[in-house]
């Protein structure tokens, strides 16, 4: 269908003689719907992850009914194919409405069914659909053998629907708040497997009763034609919070950097510490405590404790094979090196093509990165599984300050979907728990530099001095975090290896994470490329 025809179609409703309940069996409708109409709609959605690629065509991989008492909606599993010879799958629930007041948002197609004019819309905008989904979860049977499987946890106590609203702007999913008590996250980008967020949430909540993550309350999985589970929705308790730990840290760090002036602190006189030097709060020099305040360090201790408790819960399972700890082996080593060498090569090309966008310290560090590329590559290749005594477990996989909610003096960990660039199977590979720790350390590093960049004009010191102060603070942050984390882990007999092994794994994971970040920064905000470049420099020169 040509663009002109599709535009006419948007103005003149297309008429079909089938009932809504049979509409998706009409090949002509599917053809019209999937062509330019849905393409034009989908590329404008926040949750669409293919914006950097060229869309070729959309296929309807599967469809299923989401229904109750004769009220019918359709769930579509769409296969989006790209010119670059890869594809992604998306979940889109649709509804037919005749009242245009219901079709103010996410209107996809004007259409006439048996002479009745209306619109096909994204069903999530319709309160009737949201209510139906909630009621299907509430009334789920203990064992559901149908194609669309609703599951309800014993922790979901409500008996009736009261209200629903959108949670806010999200990038890759759509979350609905029910009864101001629960959050149902609809996964938009989907995979032919159970979503790790669903698996981890259910495991931590139901099997391990881990308190510092939103409790698992229910879910919706679809069994596709290949008999694979596809998670389309996850319901959890809503945690009252004061925002995420990233926002919290930025506010706190702004005060810390402002203190340089108000407390008249001489940056060059501040006492140094070694990178990865474990520190109890009593070991932190009084000049550092005076500069940054005690409460920030006690918060870091709490976060370290919660991180350790998450890993203890994930690493103390001996029945469910998806969660039992595993030793390092040759297969893991090959998988790891293949991924990292490919990623490293990609980043090398990116940096060579973007050098012209850099200046000052960023350019200096970028040249160091290029000059030491063989050293970095050797670091990645130096992984030798036979030397490790520790164990691998299921980990968070994308652990940073933005994945943690702040509630008074405590923290709640969420979003276990894993690294966005990874395949679903890669996200489920058991990893050293220190990989999550490294992710949080990179997040500390980012928060420090983001504070400097966002408020540079408010501080009287030059950038070089601010960076110096920031690097020093970073070492104290990770020293205090490591001390608490390792004590908690050892208490629970989780095996993360001996001291030398832990330092190797931390450095390895920090290098991996910083190289991963480099691609994003160079492509979207070159000024921030200095952050991962400094992280890489810290490791290769340590």
Image (spheres, rainbow, N blue to C red):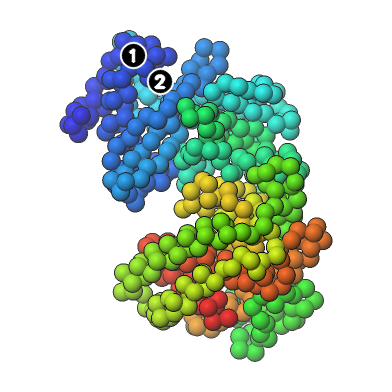
Residue occupying the point 56% across, 61% down:
333
Specify whether residue 37 is in view.
yes
Above or below, 533 against 407 in this view is: below
Residue occupying the point 68% across, 74% down:
500
Residue occupying the point 58% across, 78% down:
471
Q: In which quarter of the image is the C terminus?
A: bottom right
Side of 69 where 484 appears, left or right: right
Specify whether residue 176 is in view.
no
Residue occupying the point 42% across, 38% down:
89
Disc 2 crowd rating (10 Å Cα; few below 14, some 14-19, many 20+) is many
Residue 166: image location, x then y, percent: 53, 37
Side of 530 where 86 appears, left or right: left
In the rendered structure, are the residues bearing label 2 and label 1 in contact, judged by CB atoms less than 8 Å apart? yes
Above or below, 195 against 274 in this view is: above
- Element at badge 1? strand
Based on the displayed image, in which of its 4 quarters is residue 470 positioned?
bottom right
Q: Quadrant of the N terminus?
A: top left
Which of 345/467 is in front? 345
Based on the displayed image, in which of its 4 quarters is residue 306 positioned?
bottom right
Earlier along the polypeptide chain: callout 2 or callout 1? 2
Find residue 113 and name its label.
1
Outermost residue, right side: 491
Residue 441: image location, x then y, percent: 61, 66
Above or below, 404 against 34 in this view is: below
Residue 258: image location, x then y, percent: 60, 75
- Label 2 and label 1: CA atoms lie apart by 9 Å
- Element at badge 2? strand
- Give the residue at mark 2: 96
């Amino acid at each position: 269908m040509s663009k002109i025809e599709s535009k006419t179609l948007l103005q003149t409703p297309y008429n079909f003689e089938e009932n809504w309940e049979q509409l998706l069996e009409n090949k002509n409708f599917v053809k019209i719907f999937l062509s330019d109409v849905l393409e034009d709609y989908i590329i404008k959605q926040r949750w669409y992850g293919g914006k950097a690629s060229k869309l070729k065509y959309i296929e309807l991989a599967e469809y299923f009914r989401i229904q109750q008492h004769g009220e019918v909606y359709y769930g579509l599993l769409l296969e989006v194919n790209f010119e670059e010879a890869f594809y992604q799958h998306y979940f889109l629930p649709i509804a037919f409405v005749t009242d245009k007041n219901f079709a103010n948002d996410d209107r996809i197609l004007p259409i006439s069914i048996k002479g009745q004019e209306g619109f096909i819309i994204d069903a999530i905008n319709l309160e009737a659909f949201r209510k139906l989904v909630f009621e299907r979860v509430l009334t789920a049977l203990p064992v559901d053998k149908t194609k669309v499987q609703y599951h309800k946890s014993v922790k979901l106590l409500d008996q009736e629907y009261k209200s629903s609203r959108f949670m806010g702007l999200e990038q890759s999913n759509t979350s609905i708040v029910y009864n101001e008590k629960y959050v149902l996250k609809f996964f938009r980008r989907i995979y032919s497997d159970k979503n790790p967020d669903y698996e981890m949430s259910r495991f931590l909540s139901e099997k391990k009763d881990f308190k510092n993550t939103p409790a698992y309350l229910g879910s919706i999985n679809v069994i596709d034609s290949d008999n694979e589970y596809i998670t389309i929705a996850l319901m959890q308790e809503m945690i009252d919070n004061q925002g995420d730990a990233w926002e919290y840290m930025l506010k706190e760090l702004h005060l810390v950097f402002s203190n340089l002036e108000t407390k008249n602190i001489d940056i060059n006189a501040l006492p140094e510490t070694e990178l990865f030097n474990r520190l109890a709060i009593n070991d932190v020099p009084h000049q550092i405590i005076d500069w940054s305040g005690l409460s920030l360090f006690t918060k870091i201790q709490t976060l370290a404790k919660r991180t350790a408790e998450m890993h203890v819960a994930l690493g103390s399972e001996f029945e469910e094979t998806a969660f039992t700890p595993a030793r390092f082996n040759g297969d893991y080593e090959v998988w790891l090196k293949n991924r990292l060498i490919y990623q490293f090569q990609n980043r090398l090309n990116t940096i060579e093509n973007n050098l012209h966008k850099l200046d000052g310290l960023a350019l200096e560090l970028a040249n160091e990165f290029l000059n030491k590329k063989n050293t970095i590559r050797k670091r990645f290749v130096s992984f030798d599984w036979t030397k490790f005594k520790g164990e691998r477990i299921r980990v968070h996989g994308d652990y940073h300050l933005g994945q943690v909610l702040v509630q008074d003096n405590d923290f709640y960990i969420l979003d276990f979907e894993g690294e966005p660039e990874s395949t679903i199977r890669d996200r489920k590979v058991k990893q050293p728990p220190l990989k999550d720790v490294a992710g949080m350390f990179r997040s500390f590093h980012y928060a420090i530099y983001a504070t400097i960049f966002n408020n540079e004009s408010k501080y009287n010191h030059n950038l070089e001095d601010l960076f110096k102060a920031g690097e020093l603070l970073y070492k104290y942050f990770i020293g205090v975090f490591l001390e608490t984390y390792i004590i908690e882990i050892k208490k629970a007999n989780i095996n993360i290896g001996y001291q030398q092994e832990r330092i190797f794994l931390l450095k390895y994971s920090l290098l991996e994470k910083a190289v991963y970040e480099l691609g994003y920064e160079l492509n979207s905000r070159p000024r921030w490329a200095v952050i991962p470049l400094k992280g890489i420099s810290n490791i290769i020169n340590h």
